[in-house]
Image (spheres, rainbow, N blue to C red):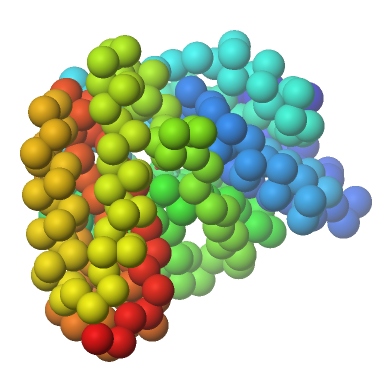
């Protein structure tokens, strides 16, 4: 496995591989890797000749400086995990390598980017589009891999790819969870022992809500999730929305969507976590 910091060096190596007709899979990450990321690497390895993992804590997607500063950075440990997972190339650029000058591009990401994370983290998705488009231009991957924990991000990236006519196939992998249900996230390392004990209530409540949903309206299910979690000391829901899985627009009636998905952002102490769950199409 090679670790490369320079765009030029990476591009020239990838050009050589492309001339040998090798297909390239890209797994964009911000590091602090966990088995969720490694499942993306595994999927990429199964579908491509070469797997590139980028590790870059992208400042333009953080709307909160405190979050950016406290974001875990564990490059050495990440490289060890990637080596063991069979990754071929790690791209770990510096901030000036990725942003030699301020990126002033503003993307028209449409309705998928206006709700939920888009509403509560202004500028976040534009920052994601900036960095992921740069990575796509640099790596020119055949396929790129994203986890379903960031469910809305996938829709936003698909929209960006369409907008820019980029020749990359977006592939997605299911959420990987701890045994107690907590969705794996780099931010979980910031939870105190006490918060770590409470956090599994999030996934458990989402799961319970699928059973609860039988015969209930969308609003009743939303209220169930919000009230159950907010009753738990140490948890505070920022939003819970049930949206159509493709348009990401909130639904009022189950019949409005063939793939309803519940998306949550919730504070566990000062750590902001997200998770989501798919509902079966329910006819009440
Ligand atoms: O999902 C993430 O970790 C980031 O948003 C991504 C896609 C690597 C862009 O910085």
Residue 73 visible in this rendered orientation of the protein = yes
- Left or right of 240, for residue 152: right
106, 79: nearer the viewer? 79
Identify the image quadrant of the C terminus. Answer: bottom left
Q: Residue at x 40, y 74 (%)?
A: 280
- Left or right of 136, for residue 22: right
Quadrant hosting residue 113:
bottom left
Q: Residue at x 43, y 39 (%)?
A: 181
Q: Residue at x 57, y 37 (%)?
A: 37
Q: Residue at x 50, y 71 (%)?
A: 165
- Left or right of 277, for residue 78: right
Q: State the image coordinates of residue 196 (x, y, percent, origin top left).
A: 32, 22
Quadrant hosting residue 198:
top left
- Residue 108 higher or lower than 268, as above or below: below
- Residue 221 higher or lower than 79, as above or below: below
Residue 126 visible in this rendered orientation of the protein = no
Q: Quadrant of ligand 1?
A: top left
- Residue 235 higher or lower than 39, as above or below: above
Q: State the image coordinates of residue 58 (x, y, percent, origin top left).
A: 37, 33
58, 190: nearer the viewer? 190
152, 241: nearer the viewer? 241
Q: State the image coordinates of residue 246 (x, y, percent, origin top left).
A: 38, 74
């Amino acid at each position: 496995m090679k670790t490369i910091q320079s765009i030029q060096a990476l591009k020239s190596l990838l050009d050589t591989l492309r001339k040998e007709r090798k297909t390239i899979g890209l797994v964009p990450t911000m590091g602090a890797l966990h088995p969720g990321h490694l499942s993306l690497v595994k999927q990429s390895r199964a579908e491509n000749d070469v797997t590139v993992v980028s590790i870059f804590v992208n400042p333009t997607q953080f709307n909160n400086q405190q979050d950016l500063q406290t974001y875990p950075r564990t490059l050495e440990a990440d490289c060890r995990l990637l080596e063991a997972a069979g990754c071929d190339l790690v791209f770990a650029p510096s901030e000036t390598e990725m942003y030699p000058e301020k990126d002033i591009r503003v993307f028209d990401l449409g309705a998928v980017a206006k709700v939920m994370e888009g509403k509560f983290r202004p500028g976040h998705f534009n920052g994601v589009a900036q960095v992921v488009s740069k990575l796509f231009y640099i790596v020119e991957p055949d396929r790129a891999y994203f986890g379903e924990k960031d469910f809305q991000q996938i829709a936003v990236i698909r929209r960006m790819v369409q907008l820019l006519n980029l020749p990359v196939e977006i592939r997605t992998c299911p959420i990987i969870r701890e045994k107690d249900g907590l969705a794996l996230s780099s931010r979980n390392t910031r939870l105190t022992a006490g918060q770590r004990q409470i956090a599994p209530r999030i996934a458990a409540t989402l799961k319970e809500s699928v059973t609860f949903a039988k015969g209930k309206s969308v609003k009743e299910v939303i209220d169930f999730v919000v009230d159950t979690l907010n009753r738990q000391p140490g948890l505070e829901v920022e939003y819970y929305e049930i949206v159509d899985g493709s348009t990401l627009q909130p639904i009022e009636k189950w019949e409005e969507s063939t793939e309803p998905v519940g998306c949550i952002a919730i504070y566990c102490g000062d750590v902001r976590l997200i998770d989501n769950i798919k509902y079966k199409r329910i006819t009440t």
